[in-house]
Amino acid sequence: MDSLTQIVLGGSVAALAVPAPHRRRAALAGALLATLPDLDSLPMKWMGVDVVTLVTWHRGPSHALPVLFVFGLLVWWLLRRWWAPVREAPRRWLAAILLALLTHPLLDAFTVYGTQLWWPLPLRPTMWSSIFIIDPGYTLALLVAFIAILVVGAKPIGQRFLVAGLVLSSAYLGWSLLAKQMVERDAQAALAAMGQADAPRFSVPMPFNTLLWRVVVMTPGGMLEGYRSLWADHGPMRFQPYAGETAALQALAHTPPVARLLWFSSGFMKAVADGDRLVLSDLRMGAEPAYSFQYLIAERASASAAWQPVAPVAVTGPMDTRGALQAIWQRLRHEPAPGAPPFALPRP
C-alpha cells in the first residue's frame, strides 16, 4: 500500500497497544516503524542494481514476517534500555512495535504486487489482490483516527477513535475479499461457457475502489481481459482477447532475468513485439494497452531473425492519467452495450 496508509495503520495499532499516557508517542513511533520496510529500494538504488533485481527484491527480506519479528525484538530490546516509556510498560510496547512492523507486509499482501512474507523460503510472493495499492476507502478511517490521537492524546475519546478506525478499515478489507469472491464467481461462469474454466487467472480491483474489477486469463495465444462492475453489470461477464508472443517468451523463459520476472509475477506476463524489440509487460499492474511495469528483454536483427536476449531495461511510455480515471468512473457506473468491448483504457 501507499506510504500514507502504512503510516496511519502503523501509528494506529501501536497507539492502541500501549497505556493511554503513551499513545501520542506510540502513534509517532509506530508511524516511523511502519515506513521502514518500504525503504528497501533506497540501498538497491544506491548500489545501482538492475531493474529486475530492484523490482523483484522490493517487498522481499524487508517485508518477510520472520525478519520483521526478529527486527522488532531487537528494536524493543534497545528501546527498553534507553527509553523510559518502554521500560514502564515493556510488554505493551513490545506488542506495539511488532504490530506496527508486521501489519505493513500483511496489508501489502492484499495488493496484487506480491509480498515475500516467508522469505527466505523459495515461495512465490503472496498476492491476495483484493485492494488497489491506493484506496481512500481503506485509508480515510485510519487517517482520522491517527490525527485524533495526536490531538487528544491520553483522553478516553482517543481510544474510541482508534477502535473505530481499525474496525472500519478492517471491515473494508473484509468487503474487498467478499467483492473479489463475487467477481470470481461471475468470471468462473463466463469462462466455463468459453471452455477456459481452468485457465490461470487473477482478479484485481481498478484504482481507488472495490466496485470495478479486472480479470485476466492466460491463454496459449496470449490473454483474455474482462471487467466486472458490481454496481452496474448484470449480464454475463465478457472478455476481450489479446495476442502475445508466447513462443518467444517460452524461448527466453530460461534466461535468469525473465525467469525471475515470471516467478515474481506468478507467470502473469505478456510479451509483445515492438518492431525489432520484444517488450515484456507485467499484466497485474495496469490494463490494456498501458502497463506500469514493462521491460525490454530481447532484440532481433530483422523480422525473420531469432530473438536475442538483452539486459532488461525498463520501458516507459505516455499515459493519459486523467482520461484513464474518467474511463474507469464511466465504466464503473455503466455496463457496455451488447457487442461493445468490455472496457479499454484510452490510448495516449
Image (spheres, grey):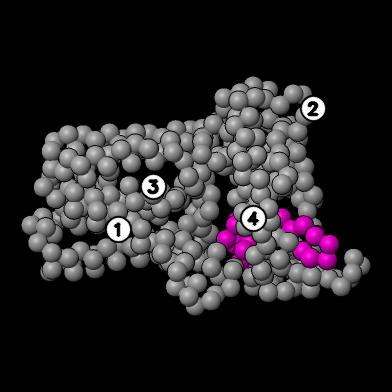
Give the residue type at disc 1. Answer: Leu
Rendered image: mark on residue 339: 2
Q: Residue at x 12, y 69 (%)?
A: 81
Give the residue type at disc 4. Answer: Asp
Callout 2: 10 Å neighbours few (<14), some, many (20+)? Answer: few
> For mark 4, what is the residue?
282
Q: CA distance from mark 2 to mark 4?
A: 28 Å
Quadrant for residue 32, please give it.
bottom left
Q: CA distance from mark 3 to mark 4?
A: 24 Å
Q: Secondary structure at mark 2?
A: loop
Asked if one can make out residue 287 in the rendered structure from this viewpoint, the answer is no
> For mark 3, what is the residue?
5
Give the residue type at disc 3. Answer: Thr
Circle 4 or circle 1, nearest the eye: 1
Circle 3 or circle 4, nearest the eye: 3
Magenta-highlighted residues: 259-278
Q: Residue at x 66, y 45 (%)?
A: 320
